[in-house]
Structures are given as structure tokens and as C-alpha cells.
Amino acid sequence: AQKRVIKEIRADVGSGKHMNRLLQGDVGSGKTVVALLTMLFAIDNGFQACMMAPTEILATQHYEGLKELLKDLNVTIELLTGSTKAAQRREIHESLENGTLNIIVGTHALIEDKVQFKKLGYVVVDEQHRFGVAQRSKLWQKGNEGIPHVLVMTATPIPRTLAMTLYGDLDISVIDELPPGRKPITTSHRFDSSRLRVFGFIEKEIAKGRQVYVVYPLIKESEKMDYKDLMDGFDSIERRFPKPQYQISMVHGQMKAADKEFEMQRFVKGETQIMVATTVIEVGVNVPNASVMVIESAERFGLSQLHQLRGRVGRGAEQSYCILMTGNKLSADGKLRMQTMV
């Protein structure tokens, strides 16, 4: 499926027409590799490429992933986000303008007027539903030798008919296969009243040597309440899974980046069995050994978010599970969303 998509893109960019393509593929189907290989077409033809992601965590993850894939190639890549230091920013601006920088990965920071390219030929936009058309077009205008080719990527499955109305201007490519050995994720919906059974299930999975995510919603308006939810949840998990037998990581938006990274790394290395987090986890951590994703107050998430979160498990060969926990009182809309996910 990846090869087929790369061929479609290659035919497009070689046709002399402007490419506008939507690449849809489930979480973990290898969209990043397709993006990189097609960026290299641009670089081989003397152009620069850029990749824009909606959040710093996602941009950083793409940057780290691409840098690793490029380590033996003579291709330069940098990361530009809101937290890039001024001195480094100046260097990046300069190397983009004089053409020594081949690939820039970043957030909305790439749209700023200060960011100018010598010869931008290829733009990749990830999780497109979070960017408006105006934001995308600002990137296109940075192509001073004609409009750059555009590849828009999403992991949210969009029915073809809907895609035609949402993205009427885009051709659609789909990676409809997962890497060999992946098993479909078993998704179930449980009410708060069956929490003890869920904890029992988590215990069994940990006993098999697996790891678990427990995710809490975080909605800006009520950060205090959400923070309390997260802390209460953390406490009850700590009581049920006591040290030293169990180790628990916690990650949330109010932590310093270095602390977040430290906790994430402990989980990646398997030093902790449970990761309690807010949605900062939605994108980007790849832990093949994690087999359970428990989403608390799942009714407070939208479908595309639930889909992204679920994609954090099922990355190894083991059977994985996603458990949607909700309050006992659910609106009709909430019920429908849970059924859809299941």
C-alpha cells in the first residue's frame, strides 16, 4: 500500500501539474515514511520541503523520526516551533533563505512571515483537520518558484463521500494495510460502575509483561477541575497498583518539558507499567509493548481524538485493547460515539 501511494505521488509531481493530495492511513501505517520518501523527490530536484504539524509534541516527534531515518544521508533537517530559541531561529531562517536547509519540520511557526524559503517545492501538512485553508495557503505562497506540491495527511478515517465534500480540491490516496503481524485492537465501552473489573483486567495484562495508558481529558475552560480529575485518578490507580511492585508515570500539560520527557522515557524503557496522562499523549509516543489504552470520561472526546488515542496501542504483535470509560449517564450523542468507536 505504501509503494502504491508513493507511485501515485510520484506520477503527480512528475506530471507538470500542481499536486494536491490527501493521504489517509491509520495510525501506525507508515505515513511518515511515505512523506519522507516523497520529500526526497523534491530535494533531488533542487527544491526544499517542509512539514507542518498542529502541536509541538507532534512536530517534535516527526522531527525525531525523520532525523533518525536521514542519519546516513546527506540531507539537512531542522525543527521550528514556538519554543525554538531566538539564536537558533535566526540560523534556521538564514539557512532556509540560502538553501542549505533541505527540510524544515514545525508547527504554525512555519507560517510566520519571517520564514522565507530559497526554493520551496513540497509541503506536507499533518492532521489537516486542525488547520484552516487560510493557514495552508500561507504556506503555498512561500513557494517563490510556483506553488509547491501539497500532501495532506490524516489518520482519521474519512468516508470517501465526505472526503469529496470536505476536500473537493484534493485527490485521495489511502494506505489501507497495516504492517504485517498487527492485530486489530479490541475496543470496548465500560461504565464507571465496572471500574474494579477494568482494574482487574489491567492487572492481568501487566502480569503478562505489558504496559498500560490511562488518559484523562483536559479541556482548557475547566483546567482546575480536569487537573483534579487527573490527580484523583492517579491516586486511585496508585492505591490499586502500589509501589514497589508497580511503577507509574504521569504526564500532563503543566509539567516542564524536561520532566515530561523524563517520565515518557521511563515508560518507553519499560521502567513504569502504567502511564497516567492527559491528551498530550494523543500523538507521538510509540511503545510497542503497551497493550491497553483506558480512556477516562471518553464521552468528552471527539471521534478523531478517540481514534488517535486508540492508535497509541496495537503497535506490537500482541493483542491490544482500548477501553472507553464513561459516566453512567450518557447523552444519545455520547452513546452513538461510543458505539461508533467500538
Image: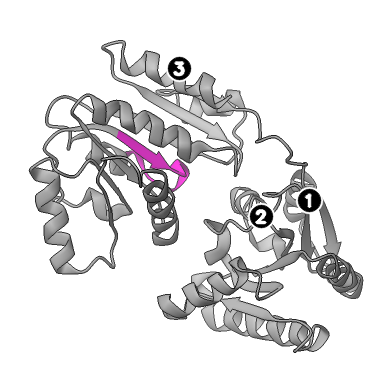
Element marked by disc 1 = loop
Q: Which residues are magenta?
A: 123-133
Q: Position of residue 120 (x, y in %)?
A: 19, 34
Query: Which residue in the structure is indicated by mark 3?
Result: 8
Give the mark nearest the N terminus, 2 or 3. 3
Q: Is 230 rendered above or below residue 33?
A: below
Q: Disc 2 and disc 1: Cα gap in Å?
A: 9 Å
Q: Earlier in the sequence, mark 2 or mark 1?
A: 2
The residue positioned farthest toward the front in the image shown: 72
Specify whether residue 114 is in view.
no
Q: Is residue 275 left or right of residue 38?
A: right
- Residue 106: which numbered mark, if any? none
Q: Residue at label 2?
A: 288
Q: Residues within 10 Å of mark 3 (few under 14, many from 20)?
A: some
Q: Where in the figure is residue 203, as x and y percent of width and height? A: 86, 72
The residue that mark 1 highlights is: 318
